[in-house]
Amino acid sequence: MSDDPALAPTETRAQSLAGILIAGPAPSLGILAGLHLWPGPLGNALYMAGKGALYLTPLVWWWLIRRRKFPVARPPAGSLREGVVVGLVLGGLIVAAYFLVGRSMMDASRLRVAATASGFDTPMRYVVMATCICLINALLEEYAFRWFLYSRCRALLGTLGGAILGALIFTTHHVFVLMAYFDWPIVLLGSFGVFVGGLLWQGLYERRASVWPAYVSHVIVDVALLGIGASLLFG
């Protein structure tokens, strides 16, 4: 893919690096503050600030560098089928790993305490939260991590180096989330899965120059994960 719609022809390497340094660490710092360092009002405010930096930076970047209307393109022909196939494979591996090894390693009581503290301790509230994660958060993450961050990582390091750096950035904040709820074996296993997912979704973006196939795949994976979460919480 020679013409990435996320990159302006005049964007310099220094500008790409600045975009990575602003948006890349933001979600990890927010999660560290909200879940580990200062849980409560201050941590929540910093968590939201981290999310804001991640999702608003690409919009500001697009306006400053390109000064054009933000693009919303239709999925390329056949690309959604590719996303479905990748999502079903990843989702199937996640469910299989859970039943084979994960279920015996998880302490569901920690997850129930966290769900109660967050207000997602009833099936209806959990479904609302899960729907938002699947449909909204997955789209925002694909737009931020694939469309914006991966494009700039690749501009700096090439396809292979950019893919590794982009997947590492995507994985880091998930590591801190997993650390808040699970022991190290699950943290390591889950982090590896996130890294592989990031690589595959970047591959879909590289192939199609569109976030839509990766988004479809991301939704399917989130459904698998949240289904496992529902099983742990509600039996």
Image (cartoon, rainbow, N blue to C red):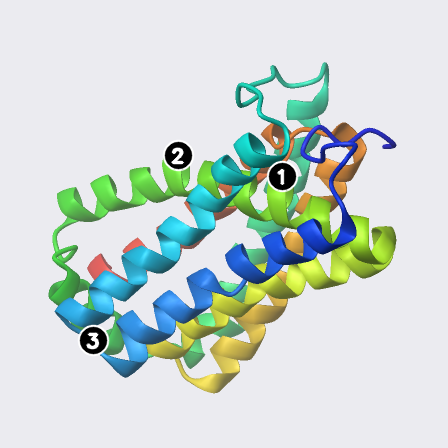
Q: How crowded is mark 3: few (under 14 residues within 10 Å), some or many (20 or more)?
A: some
Badge 2 amino acid: Leu
**Chain-order first, disc 3 or disc 2:** 3
Q: Is mark 3 on a helix, strand or loop?
A: loop
Which of the image's four quarters has the N terminus?
Answer: top right
Q: How far apart are marks 3 and 2 (CA)?
A: 27 Å
Q: What element carries label 1?
A: helix
Residue at image point 15% right, 46% down: 125
Q: What element carries label 2?
A: helix
The residue closer to the viewer here, 222 or 49, is 49
Badge 3 amino acid: Pro
Quadrant of the rendered image containing residue 136: top left
Q: Which mark is residue 116?
A: none
Left or right: residue 4 versus residue 127 is right
Q: Can residue 84 be seen in this snapshot?
A: yes
Q: Can residue 200 be seen in this snapshot?
A: no
Which residue matches tag 3? 39
- Measured from the top left, where is residue 225 in percent x and y? 43, 54
Q: How far apart are marks 3 and 1 (CA)?
A: 31 Å
Badge 1 amino acid: Trp
Residue at image point 80% right, 55% down: 156
Which residue matches tag 2? 135
Q: Which mark is residue 147?
A: 1
Q: Distance between the residues labelled 1 and 2?
A: 17 Å
Which of label 1 and label 2 is nearer to you? 1
Left or right: residue 183 versus residue 233 is right
Q: Residues within 10 Å of mark 1 (few under 14, many from 20)?
A: many
Relative to 1, residue 93 above or below:
below
Residues at badges 3 and 2 in contact (C-beta under 8 Å)?
no
Q: How crowded is mark 2: few (under 14 residues within 10 Å), some or many (20 or more)?
A: some
- Measured from the top left, where is residue 132 in percent x and y? 31, 39
